[in-house]
């Protein structure tokens, strides 16, 4: 009896929905006051524009690689293929899976922790209650994902509608209030282009970029996408453009009702916004919708990340157990349970403020910069095998690398050192793994 394999069941709508639900999550609702506080002026909107620019440029890189290698695992396959000729492919792909086993649960846990934090607007929770709530969210998502991919695609569309509806309500509230244009007119009040602004923009962009992460989630599901050479790039560009429009309008809407000086101090800025517009009942309803959006993000992120260890194990580069598919539902259940279990533990141990910068610092060198450099190498070797080719190549790649370096520096030296430590331990683990495998072959 042959091993069950993945099936291509997700179309453009489902792929875009999965991306966008992963991108939104709890991110923009909790980082909005952080971004305003860092820039401390009406020009905080530039941080959201900068995040969109970087995301769109990076989506071009993901699109070239995703369309060329539409397999489960995303970056695992990209790094293996792009560094194949330099004999670093196995190391780079191993390092990506290594860091994924840490940073993916952190991403999942961050959304679950954010869920529990926003829940306390309606019902104050004790420290233990908050932990139980965030852990419960992870468990609920694992149970919901234990099913066929076509059913998950339908669930993703429903959650996507909830995401769009929630943000649309926030934007509509600002439009009805009548002051929507005011923040745009005054965006440059007090603005000075100097070193202080550039530094603050870098720090603020760490938070805004975190809220855009997920536009590439479709690449992790490459083996389950219909017509991947077209739908993978399209879903990413649609996701980034759509989310940028929604984020920008949402930010403008909020500060058109609540002055930015007040918004930067609010832990539940969306709830405060709706309370001021329509009263306490509306504030509780919007809070419930934000919780649904946060849950949708955990759902989408867990779905995508669970395919990475599976792809590596199937390729013989990770523990064999992770390659197991569910015998009837045809999804990598061991990988899903492992990442979910680690995320559950992280959701109990860490605070939200501790993980946002760590998530970026851990991923930038190996994944984002590593892929960009790898694409440059691969394009030199293979000129005509890419279903999608970015315009003005290689300029967008160089711009993307420079922007990622700036974001990495802005996470702070402690986070950078932490990311380098994880990479160093991964290199050691890689060579130990190879030595043990070679020894096993010798003894046979």
Image (cartoon, rainbow, N blue to C red):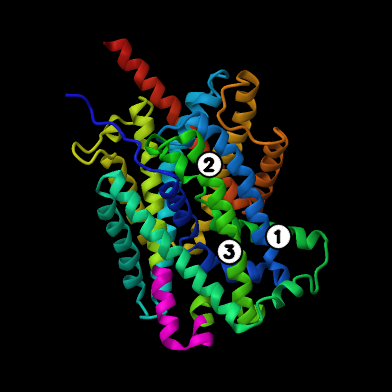
Which of the 4 image quadrants contains residue 130? bottom left
**Where does residue 206 sit, x and y in percent of width and height?**
61, 56
Q: Earlier in the sequence, mark 2 or mark 3?
A: 3
Residue 135 vs residue 374, the one in the foreground: 374
User: Foreground mark, 2 or 3?
Assistant: 3
Counting from the top left corner in percent of width and height, residue 320 is at: 29, 29
> Residue at point 71% right, 37% down?
398
- The residue beneath circle 1 is 201
For the residue carrying disc 2, how many other residues have a C-alpha within 10 Å: few (<14), some (14-19), or many (20+)? Answer: few
Is residue 289 shown in magenta?
yes
Q: Is residue 277 above or below residue 144?
A: below
Above or below — where is 435 with respect to 429? above
Q: Which residue is mark 3?
A: 247
**Magenta-colored span:** 274-291
Q: In the image as oriented, which residue stretches furthest toward the left?
A: 1
Which residue is at 28% across, 40% downward? 331
Above/below status of 189 relative to 355 = below
Residue on which disc 2 sits: 421
Q: Is residue 431 above or below residue 105?
A: above
Q: CA distance from mark 2 to mark 1?
A: 27 Å
Indicate whether residue 133 is drawn in magenta: no
Secondary element at image label 1 = helix
């Amino acid at each position: 009896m042959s091993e069950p394999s993945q099936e291509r069941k997700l179309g453009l709508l489902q792929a875009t929905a999965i991306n966008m639900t992963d991108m939104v999550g709890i991110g923009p609702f909790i980082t909005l006051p952080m971004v305003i506080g860092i820039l401390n002026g009406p020009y905080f909107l530039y941080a959201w524009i900068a995040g969109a620019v970087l995301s769109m440029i990076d989506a071009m890189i993901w699109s070239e690689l995703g369309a060329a290698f539409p397999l489960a695992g995303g970056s695992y396959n990209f790094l293996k293929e792009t560094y194949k000729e330099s004999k670093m492919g196995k190391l780079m792909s191993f390092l990506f899976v290594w860091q994924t086993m840490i940073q993916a649960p952190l991403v999942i846990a961050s959304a679950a922790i954010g869920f529990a934090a926003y829940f306390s607007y309606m019902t104050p929770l004790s420290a233990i209650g908050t932990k139980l709530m965030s852990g419960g969210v992870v468990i609920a998502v694992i149970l919901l994902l234990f099913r066929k991919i076509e059913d998950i695609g339908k669930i993703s569309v429903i959650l996507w509608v909830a995401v769009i509806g929630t943000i649309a309500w926030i934007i509509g509230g600002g439009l009805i209030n009548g002051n929507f244009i005011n923040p745009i007119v005054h965006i440059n009040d007090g603005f000075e282009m100097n070193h202080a602004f550039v530094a603050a923009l870098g720090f603020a962009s760490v938070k805004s970029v975190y809220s855009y992460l997920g536009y590439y989630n479709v690449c992790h599901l490459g083996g389950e996408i219909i017509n991947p050479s077209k739908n993978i790039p399209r879903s990413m560009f649609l996701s980034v453009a759509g989310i940028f429009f929604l984020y920008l309008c949402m930010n403008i809407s909020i500060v058109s009702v609540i002055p930015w000086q007040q918004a930067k101090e609010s832990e539940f800025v969306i709830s405060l916004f709706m309370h001021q517009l329509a009263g306490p009942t509306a504030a509780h309803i919007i809070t419930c919708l934000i919780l649904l959006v946060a849950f949708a993000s955990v759902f989408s992120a867990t779905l995508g990340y669970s395919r990475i260890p599976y792809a590596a194990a199937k390729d013989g580069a990770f523990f064999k157990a992770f390659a197991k598919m569910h015998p009837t539902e045809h999804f990598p259940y061991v990988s899903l349970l492992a990442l979910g279990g680690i995320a559950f533990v992280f959701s109990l141990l860490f605070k939200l403020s501790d993980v946002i910068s760590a998530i970026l610092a851990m991923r930038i060198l190996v994944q984002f910069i590593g892929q960009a450099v790898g694409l440059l190498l691969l394009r030199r070797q293979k000129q005509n095998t890419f279903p999608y080719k970015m315009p003005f190549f290689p300029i967008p790649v160089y711009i993307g690398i420079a922007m990622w370096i700036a974001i990495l520096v802005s996470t702070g030296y402690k986070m950078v050192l932490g990311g380098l430590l994880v990479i160093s331990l991964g290199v050691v683990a890689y060579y130990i793994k190879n030595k043990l495998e070679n020894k096993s072959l010798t003894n046979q």
